[in-house]
């Protein structure tokens, strides 16, 4: 039986959005490549770790993304965690620009041919493990096949703003 979802007036949806936005996250650029060799990438803060055994992560992509098909067909994707110094990449990969978002962006080689952003805080190269239809988004679970950890502070997204962290020492 199909269930209709309750009507969510726009103001209520905005309130929910604001409340959800109070949960601070890091910022990533998720990338892949099509069989024709086209590089794909977009800014995403929906990334999260899921499991260590097996090593699984997930992120979600809105269904109206121009790149939904590319990620659905992809056997692999990469998650590039941005540093506080990579705000420009956050904006670049969240904007519609003329031409290729990767133009002029320094990249590293990948075992899987994926575009890997240089100087990221961490990178995870994943095989697509599972895809879950989730409302207006599709969740992609990935199995981590390779990863590396770089240096620096994370770029933070909270309350609709980008923040650089002010570290607080953890009490012993
Ligand atoms: C900080 C930040 C986080 C974002 N997180 C996501 C996300 O997790 N999933 C998503 O689908 N879009 C997210 N977006 C929006 C996309 O980056 C943006 O809509 C982009 O233009 C999509 O590109 P595409 O339509 O070419 O795929 C985010 C944007 C910003 C600025």
Image: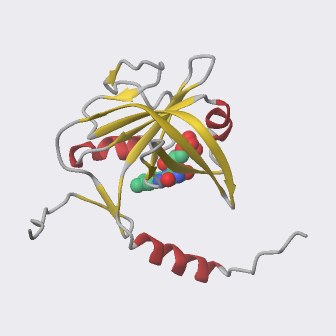
| Horizontal side, residue 6 vs residue 35: left or right | right
| Percent x, y of residue 164 | 21, 57
When the figure is inspected, residue 137 is found, relative to residue 146, above or below; the finding is: below
Residue in the foreground of this view, choosing between 160 and 128: 128
- Residue 11 relative to residue 94: left or right: right
Which of these two is toward me, 171 or 111? 171
Residue at image position (35%, 36%) is 123
Q: Is residue 92 above or below residue 33?
A: below
**Picture residue at 68% right of the left edge, 80% below the top:** 8
Q: Quadrant of residue 109?
A: top left
The quadrant in which the C terminus is found is bottom left
Q: How is the image coloured?
A: secondary structure
Tag count in the figure?
0
Question: Which residue occupies the foreground of this view, 125 or 37?
Answer: 125
- Quarter of the picture holding the N terminus: bottom right
At 29% from the left edge and 47% from the top edge, which residue is drawn?
Answer: 87
The image shows residue 83 at horizontal and vertical percentages of 25, 45
Please tell me whether residue 102 is drawn above or below residue 27 in the rendered image: above
* Residue at the extreme right of the image, as rendered: 1
Percent x, y of residue 158? 34, 66
Is residue 103 left or right of 106 when viewed as pictured?
right
Measured as percent of width and height from the top left, residue 80 is found at 37, 38
Q: Which residue occupies the extreme front position in the image?
A: 53
Q: Residue at x 66, y 37 (%)?
A: 72
């Amino acid at each position: 039986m199909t269930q209709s979802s309750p009507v969510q007036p726009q103001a209520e949806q905005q309130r929910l959005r604001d409340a959800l936005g109070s949960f601070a996250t890091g910022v990533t650029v998720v990338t892949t490549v099509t069989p024709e060799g086209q590089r794909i990438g977009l800014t995403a803060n929906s990334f999260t770790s899921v499991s260590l055994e097996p090593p699984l992560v997930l992120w979600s992509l809105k269904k109206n993304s121009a790149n939904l098909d590319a990620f659905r067909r992809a056997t692999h994707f990469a998650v590039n965690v941005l540093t506080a110094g990579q705000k420009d990449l956050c904006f670049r990969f969240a904007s519609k620009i003329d031409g290729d978002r990767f133009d002029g962006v320094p990249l590293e080689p990948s075992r899987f041919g994926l575009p890997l952003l240089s100087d990221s805080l961490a990178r995870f190269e994943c095989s697509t493990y599972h895809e879950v239809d989730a409302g207006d988004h599709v969740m992609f679970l990935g199995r981590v096949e390779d990863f590396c950890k770089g240096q620096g502070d994370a770029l933070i997204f909270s309350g609709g703003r980008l923040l650089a962290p002010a570290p607080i020492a953890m009490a012993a």
